[in-house]
Image: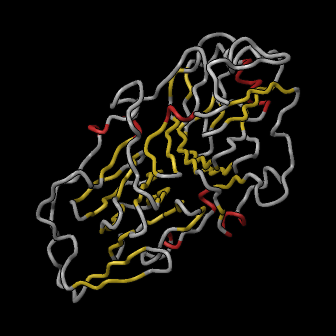
Amino acid sequence: MESFVHLRKGRTPRRLHADLDGLKDDELGRGGFTGRTANMYRRHDPTAYRAVGPLRPLDLLSGELKPGDATDAGGGPLLMFGNADCRIMLSRRHEPMPFYTRHVDGDLLCFVHRGTGVAETEFGPLRYREGDWLYIPKACTWRQAPEGETTLLMVETTDELRVPPPGQLGRHFPFDPSQSTIPDPAPIEDDGRDEYEVRLVHEGGPTTLYYQHNPLDVEGWRGDNFPFTFNIADYNVVTSDSVHLPPTVHLFMQATGVYVMNFLPKPAESVPGTERTPWYHRNVDYDEIAFFHGGSLYGIPMPPGLISHAPQGVHHGAPEKARDRARRKFDEHSRVDWQVIAVDTRRRLTPSGEVLANDLGQHS
């Protein structure tokens, strides 16, 4: 049962995630780092295994995937992972949509990995750039008009996406919603075509609606349900000098069974003996998706566009050689320069055939 008093048995360091003296720090926790925990101190690296079966971790390069919209303006994004709560997709569109689209099964949250352009919405246009989150409410009609190739990580949720409730830091940290960009209405005139195609994206679809006028004809709007963009450069990273904080402090938005986080540049932990790399864990209640936007980890470049999937119940974490290097070079680095987008899901994710076909085989 949960208790203010935590038991300690055998050889354990005095501080959590610090002063390991050759041991391997392994956390078995519930509730995505917020529930009951057991920290075990092992002799060996728990990620040194070979995996066979559907729960093996996957690593792949997004640049090797082939979304339909990368080569065909009339194509759509590629489904990478899915469950009953969400679908995680990849888009690499380089031409404006010749149609409009409407996701009717849930909200849509897109991360702009590469590119610039405009998302034309019923509420008005939203310009996007690298590092932006683009939020499109459920059933909102919109159209993407990229200025050259745009790579999007897309998360569609069946439940409503919301800003997390305020915690002990208040309503503006780590995410200050007032720094979001909200569109102003800008109705688009008809261009003389006979009809306008609106594709409804839904399970069992698609369905197509044909209008005799441009569907983005809104003169004005009011309320608290609207699209927006928010750039990761405006995200306030919560830090600690003496302990590597859990992923939950980097939460951006959430829906039932789905949590989206930003791991961004920050000062490195400075108290000697503190483990600066995330501890080994198997996050038993959540699958984890990590999308590497860029940056480096203590001088080691992180491959932009790398995608990793860690199934719940299976150990993952940086290999021991990377941890040893971080300890040896403790005095050489004062910052962590990573840029990683993470999606945790309560239900297990099913990888698509294209994802399985492009697995780098790191755990085979």
Who is closer to the viewer here, 314 or 129?
314
The residue drawn where x is 82% and y is 60% is 53
The residue drawn where x is 61% and y is 40% is 31
Colour scheme of the picture: secondary structure
How many numbered marks are there?
A: 0
Position of 47 with respect to 184 (left or right) is right
The residue drawn where x is 67% and y is 55% is 60
Which image quadrant is residue 67 in?
bottom right
Residue 75, percent from left and from top: 47, 76
In the picture as drawn, the residue positioned furthest to the front comes out as: 1
Q: Which quadrant: the C terminus?
A: bottom right
Residue 91, percent from left and from top: 49, 63
Residue 333, percent from left and from top: 61, 19
Who is closer to the viewer here, 258 or 342?
258
Position of 3 with respect to 138 (left or right) is right
Who is closer to the viewer here, 62 or 218?
218
Who is closer to the viewer here, 288 or 299?
288
The correct choice, above or below, for 74 with respect to 331 in the image is: below
Residue 346, percent from left and from top: 59, 51
The correct choice, above or below, for 178 with respect to 12 in the image is: below
Which image quadrant is residue 98 in?
bottom left
Q: Which quadrant: the N terminus?
A: top right
The residue drawn where x is 83% and y is 19% is 22
In the picture as drawn, the residue positioned furthest to the left comes out as: 219
